[in-house]
Amino acid sequence: MKIESLAPTIHESDRYLVWTLADVDITATVAILPLGAKKARCTGWTKHPAYHKLGWQRGDNAPHMEIALTAEALDRPMVDMLQTLQHESVHVRAITLMLANPGKEKDYNDTAKSGRHNKRFKESAESHGLEVILGANGKPTDSYGFGYTRFQPAFEAAMFEQFQPDESSFGLHRIVNQAKNPGPPLWGCPECSQPTSLGPHKGRAYEKGDVGTNQTGAPSVRLMCPDCMILIVPGKMDGDQFIAY
């Protein structure tokens, strides 16, 4: 029997957090946990029993912080994994300040209960090697707030030089509910018989419907085949060939 262990991933994550949080005095445990009911964008989280009722402890010792990586998101490139750990290290700093200032937690909390990352997170992230990704208008793109982050180029270069990450430590990841057959495209060109992944905004093409409408009865999006310059239509696949209804 051969065992593929997650130990290298956890060890490298431990090593990275010790490196980037060398100035922080707090105890934490890195865990790899399933995504569960969390949103698909979730690649990790940081929790402390004092505020989140989640954490770890050995025997009767005091509980300490949980820094989790989601098992389904371990298939990303190594740099993405380290960016997640750096993101979580920003939360570690915020929680450390909250613990050190009882009664004034609101002054340091960087995340709302909804998961929205506030301006405190943004300021701390930018002070610790991350840049916050914003929309074209310079504002957050959705309810995640200032939570979308990536390495600042200078920090990333320094990290590779100083930390020297081991890329072989990452790659093993969890897969869940993979469809056996995602199904062929249901729209295509009736002239050249080429399928396309494009189609109506909602609904699925179906055989009993009129050409140019979807399952809801609404008109399909007017998309044209770039080669034949005619509208795509509902249809089905026969082997590799698209057959229009």
Image (cartoon, grey):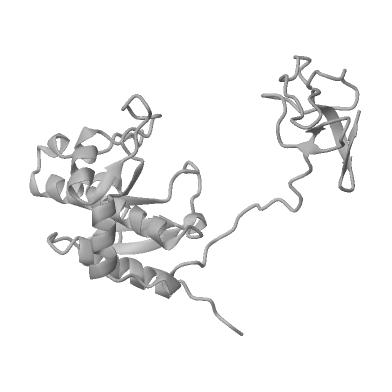
Residue 187's place in the image compared with 184, above or below, is above
Q: Is residue 100 visible?
A: yes
Which residue is pictured at 59% across the width and 58% down the height?
Answer: 175
- Residue 150 location (% of width, % of height): 34, 48
Which residue is pictured at 42% across the width and 50% down the height?
Answer: 43
Q: Nearer the viewer, residue 81 or 89?
A: 81
The image quarter in which residue 7 lies:
bottom left
Task: Name the side, left or right, on which 240 lies relative to 185.
Answer: right
Residue 180's place in the image compared with 185, above or below, is below
Task: Name the side, left or right, on which 167 lies relative to 192.
Answer: left
Q: Nearer the viewer, residue 163 or 93?
A: 163
Q: Is residue 57 visible?
A: no
- Residue 63 location (% of width, % of height): 24, 60
- Residue 164 location (% of width, % of height): 30, 71
Q: Nearer the viewer, residue 138 or 44?
A: 138
Residue 133's place in the image compared with 216, above or below, is below
